[in-house]
Image: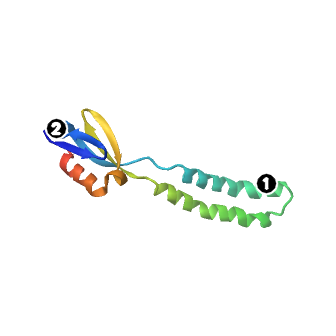
Amino acid sequence: MSEVQIGERTFDAEAITDAHLSHGRRDFRPLVVGMGMILLALLVPTAGVAAGVEFWTLAPVGVGLFVFSPVAFYFWLRSSKQVLVVVADDELYHFAVDYVGEQRARAVVAEFSR
C-alpha cells in the first residue's frame, strides 16, 4: 500500500476518496471595523449637533469615516484563505494551502479529485 503525506499527517492512498480546494473562513475584524466606521459616520455629527457644535464643523469627520469604510470591507473580502479539503475514511480533513504548499495541494487535488 502506498501512503500520501499531507502536512504532518500520513494517509493510506486507498482511504482517500476525494480532495478539493475550498475557501476557508474570513477574518471578521475588518467587517466590524467597516460597520463601525459607518455607524460613527452617523453618530459623530449627530452627537456633535446635540452637544451644540455646528453641523458643518463635524460633517467632514462623518464624510471621511463613510468614504474610507469600503477599504475595511475590501480587506474583509480579501481575508479568505484557500483550504485543501481531504476526505479519507469518511472524515473531512482541512489543511491550509499556505501550510501544505500550493503546488503540493494542487497535486493532491489532481490525483484524488473525484
Residue at the far front in the pictured view: 8
Rendered image: mark on residue 104 = none
Where is residue 32 shown, x and y percent of the image? 59, 50
Q: Quadrant of residue 2?
A: top left
- 80 sits to left or right of 114: right
Amino acid tagged 1:
Ala
The residue nearer to you, when weighing 99 against 89, is: 99
Instruction: Identify the image quadrant of the C terminus.
Output: top left
Residue at the far top in the pictured view: 90
Where is residue 90 shown, x and y percent of the image? 26, 32
> Mark 2 against mark 1, which lies toward the viewer?
2
Residue at the far right in the pictured view: 52
Q: Residue at (46%, 57%) from the top-left corner? A: 78
**Circle 2: element type:** helix
Classify mark 2: residues with Cα within 10 Å, few (<14), some (14-19) or many (20+): few
The colour mode here is rainbow
The residue nearer to you, when weighing 109 against 56, is: 109
Rendered image: mark on residue 47 = 1
Amino acid tagged 2:
Glu
**Circle 1: element type:** helix
Q: Residue at (60%, 60%) from the top-left corner? A: 69
Q: Residue at (64%, 55%) from the top-left corner? A: 38
Rendered image: mark on residue 14 = 2
Where is residue 44 shown, x and y percent of the image? 74, 56
The residue nearer to you, when weighing 110 against 12, is: 12
Instruction: Identify the image quadrant of the N terminus.
Output: top left
The answer to the question of whether label 2 and label 1 lie on touching residues, with beta carbons closer than 8 A, is no
